[in-house]
Image (cartoon, rainbow, N blue to C red):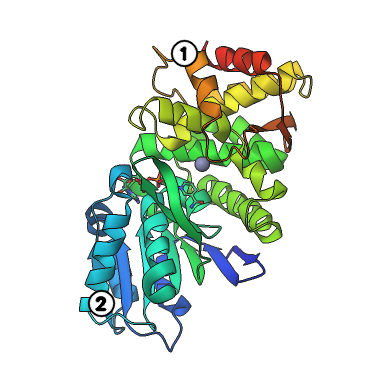
């Protein structure tokens, strides 16, 4: 069974990637734990609650629902859940199990981070995006009206339990959006992963189990390695933001309504790849291969009416922009990237124009 260790100055935990792993969820709950709180959404619970219910049988537990959706990833929901926990007998010995997509992992993780100044969380991500990204790494948080993920905490989980079986029910568009984050992992750090996606799109899209498991395992291996070396987003962790600089601008410009996160990242990767080529870092042949791989898992929704200038202007407002410096993660070749700032504005604009065409 693939197990990956995350080791940061504050925590050490395993990430398990295995079909049927949810059935052994209880193995990750400390014997001394008090009441368990499964934080989830109604749809995920309806589809996959039974296996979790069985896995936790015999342990004191309560299932807590929240409405889901980006607009409900808010502090008010965290407060409501914390109240329910207290009324149900939650205390410092309680453990949260965040069971759902990335929104659930972020919100459930943040709830655990601040409930009575912090209780443990077990992450059980159920979308491809959450399995390869949101569930691993300890970033938790909620949105403000002013922007995404602006309230949050680093709170490393006790364990991350990834069961690829649950992906069978994931809508096709959500699945493809997650694939773009997998492709990102390939471009930044793993030529093998990139080549798997480049060569076998039919099996990837058909969710061929052995291929899906390999995609998740390799992405998790990379994320675990990067987070272990750099928990709090210094230079190394930044490489995980490949495609996210322009991707975030696109999400914000379209009010988070038109593109799924992974789709916006696909667009952002196209822009960053073109920028790398314009900056003389990447060969034309490598740009073509990356662009073709992105296209193979598309299409993303139409980009009509989006102006390159508007996206460029948004880059300055990004959360990742520190003291006005926009950082780009640019591929030098498939499997290696470089973080750069201070790039010529006209070149950035041209790269965005290229991605819009
Ligand atoms: N903390 C991090 O490091 C990190 C990294 C990446 C993304 N994120 C966050 O993750 C969120 C996006 O996550 P997401 O893309 O998983 O969205 P999501 O949580 O909204 O899930 C997408 C949809 O799929 C449903 N769903 C979940 N699992 C399912 C399953 N197995 N079968 C059928 N339907 C299922 C959900 O209920 C939801 O409707 C964003 O808020 C983003 O900020 C966090
Ligand atoms: Zn992302």
Q: Is residue 108 left or right of residue 292?
A: left
Q: Position of residue 83 (x, y in %)?
A: 24, 70
Quarter of the view holding residue 51: bottom left
Q: Is residue 353 left or right of residue 263?
A: right
Residue 2 makes an appearance in the image = yes
Say which residue label 1 marks: 307
Q: Position of residue 152 (x, y in %)?
A: 45, 56
Q: Residue at x 43, y 74 (%)?
A: 117
Give the secondary structure at mark 1. Answer: loop
Q: Nearer the viewer, residue 161 or 154?
A: 154
Q: Is residue 350 left or right of residue 314?
A: right
Q: Quadrant of the N terminus?
A: bottom right
Q: Residue at x 51, y 32 (%)?
A: 317
Give the secondary structure at mark 2. Answer: helix
Q: Mark 1 packing: few (<14 Cα in 10 Å), some, or many (20+)? A: some
Q: Position of residue 319 (x, y in %)?
A: 53, 40
Q: Is residue 191 above or below residue 106?
A: above
How far apart, in angstroms, are the residues tagged by discs 2 and 1?
A: 49 Å
> On residue 86, which mark appears?
2
Q: Is residue 156 left or right of residue 226?
A: left
Q: Nearer the viewer, residue 62 or 18?
A: 62
> On residue 169, which mark appears?
none
Please tell me which of labels 2 and 1 falls first in the chain: 2
Q: Residue at x 56, y 58 (%)?
A: 137
Q: Position of residue 13 (x, y in %)?
A: 58, 70
Q: Mark 2 packing: few (<14 Cα in 10 Å), some, or many (20+)? A: few
Residue 297 makes an appearance in the image = no
């Amino acid at each position: 069974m693939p197990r990956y260790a995350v080791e940061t100055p504050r925590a050490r935990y395993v990430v398990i990637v295995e079909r049927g792993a949810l059935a052994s969820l209880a193995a990750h709950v400390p014997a001394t734990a008090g009441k368990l709180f499964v934080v989830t959404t109604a749809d995920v619970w309806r589809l996959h609650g039974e296996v979790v219910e069985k896995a936790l049988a015999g342990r004191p537990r309560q299932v807590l629902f929240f409405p889901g959706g980006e607009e409900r990833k808010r502090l008010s929901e965290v407060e409501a859940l914390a109240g329910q926990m207290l009324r149900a007998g939650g205390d410092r010995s309680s453990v949260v199990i965040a069971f759902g997509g990335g929104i659930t992992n972020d919100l459930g993780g943040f709830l655990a981070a601040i409930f009575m100044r912090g209780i443990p969380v077990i992450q059980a991500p159920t979308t491809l995006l959450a399995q390869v990204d949101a569930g691993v790494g300890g970033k938790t948080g909620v949105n403000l009206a002013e922007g995404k993920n602006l309230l949050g905490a680093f709170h490393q989980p006790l364990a991350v339990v990834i069961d690829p079986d649950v992906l069978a029910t994931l809508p096709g568009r959500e699945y493809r959006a997650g694939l773009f984050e997998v492709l990102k992992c390939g471009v930044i750090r793993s030529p093998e992963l990139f080549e798997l996606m480049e060569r076998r799109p039919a099996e990837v899209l058909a969710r061929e189990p052995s291929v899906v498991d390999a995609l998740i395992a390799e992405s998790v291996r990379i994320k675990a390695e990067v987070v272990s070396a750099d928990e709090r987003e210094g230079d190394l962790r930044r490489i995980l933001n490949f495609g996210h600089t322009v991707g975030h601008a696109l999400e914000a410009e379209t009010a988070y309504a038109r593109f799924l996160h992974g789709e916006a990242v696909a667009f952002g990767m196209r822009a960053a790849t073109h920028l790398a080529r314009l900056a003389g870092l990447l060969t034309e042949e490598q740009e073509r291969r990356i662009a073709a791989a992105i296209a193979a898992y598309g299409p993303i929704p139409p980009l009509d009416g989006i102006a390159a200038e508007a996206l460029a202007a948004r880059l300055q407002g990004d959360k990742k922009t520190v003291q006005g410096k926009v950082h780009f993660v640019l591929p030098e070749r498939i499997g290696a990237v470089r973080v750069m700032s201070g790039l010529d504005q006209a070149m950035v604009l041209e790269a965005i124009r290229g991605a819009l065409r």
